[in-house]
Amino acid sequence: MKFLVVGCGSIGRRHLRNIMSLGEEELTALDVLPERRQAVKDELGLAVFSGLPEALASRPDVAFVTTPTSLHIPVALAAAEQGCHLFIEKPLSHSLEGLERLLSLVQTKGLVTLVGCNLRFHPGLVRVKKLLNEGAIGKVVAARVQVGQWLPDWHPGEDYRKGYSAQRWMGGGAVLDAIHELDYIQWLVGSPVRQVACFAGKLSRLEIEAEDTAAVLLRFADDTIGEVHMDYVQRAYSRSCHIIGDKGTIRWDYAKGQVCCYAAAEGRWEVSVDPPGWEPNQMYLDEVRHFLRCLAGDEEPAQDVLAGARTLKVALAAKAAAETGQVIRLDG
């Protein structure tokens, strides 16, 4: 198959390297910035287009959409019109504009799609999901997840004030940037969100237009309560979750690389750690490997565009709740 990666920022280049490392040889890329095009040519020796029409004219079979969030749907629509299977980085978009058209195209053309959800491939969260599936802590009643990191540390050497994360109109802000947390809490709980409340705002001295801190409260269809905190402010990177069941508790800590499970029946903690030598790119590599198996018909997508749309609606409901002070109800 022929692969086209649209957007050669850090995540686009990561996907290019990983696709190549898995043995795929027919790759091209696209970026509007000449310095990024040159960087891909120098590092990977690939042909890089400067415009979408000429890139699609090369007839790719698969498009990786790794542009700023506000461009995800327009690029995906153009590629889908041509029959390209789609990998779209999270979040699916920053609004619902064009979403129904994309969902319709994907269905009518039978396209394989995946929305970037690399945390689902983290060994710690895979372990948490397995424990929950086994009923290790009984009935889950509440889940608390959080993530935070100082925004200027995300891309050292770049001016954070000029990046998409800082610009609300480009899809920036903690709620959409940290949509991983809204995705994986639903994955772990295994029930759709029905109600959303949120407090959010630009609370720090960061020079950005979008919210830098958000606290989201979720009510799931099975009555589980979820709490999600995300921010651009914490000076030491932090990412964790805490799942409370009526027979025990599970805690995951990204930085420590461990999952702790307390089973009330045994009255003790069981601790598991990340595999020796594990490093973050393995998540992204496993994610692409999963997508390739989906393209081959061997697996079902962990999060296709329909599932990605549901998660996007939760994120947009959180933003609306923060703006209006109301609890937003989501349809079944």
Image (cartoon, helix red, strand yellow):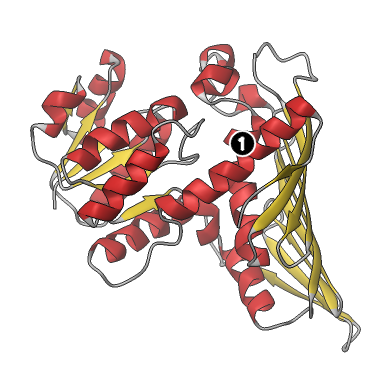
Q: How many marks?
A: 1
Q: Where is residue 224 in the image (x, y as percent from the top left)?
A: 78, 63
Relative depth, front residue between 106 and 148: 106
Q: Where is residue 46 in the image (x, y as percent from the top left)?
A: 16, 34
In the image, farthest residue toward the left: 58
Q: Name the residue under label 1.
A: 316
Query: Quick check: 22 left or right of 2?
Result: right
Q: Is residue 308 above or below residue 244?
A: above
Q: Specify the amino acid type for callout 1.
A: Leu
Name the residue at 72% across, 59% down: 220
Relative depth, front residue between 116 and 126: 116
In the image, farthest residue toward the front: 331
Q: Is residue 131 above or below residue 56?
A: below
Name the residue at 39% across, 41% down: 100
The part of the image, by quadrant, that contains residue 316 is top right
Q: Where is residue 180 in the image (x, y as percent from the top left)?
A: 58, 47
Q: Position of residue 61 (x, y in %)?
A: 16, 48
Q: Can residue 234 be seen in this view?
A: no
Q: Is residue 196 above or below residue 242?
A: above
Q: Can residue 216 be seen in this view?
A: yes
- Mark 1 falls on what kind of element? helix
Relative depth, front residue between 192 and 262: 192
Relative depth, front residue between 208 and 325: 325
The part of the image, by quadrant, that contains residue 34 is top left
The C terminus lies in quadrant: bottom right
Name the residue at 44% across, 48% down: 116
Query: Quick check: 315 left or right of 305?
Result: right
Q: Residues within 10 Å of mark 1 (few under 14, many from 20)?
A: some
The part of the image, by quadrant, that contains residue 137 is bottom right
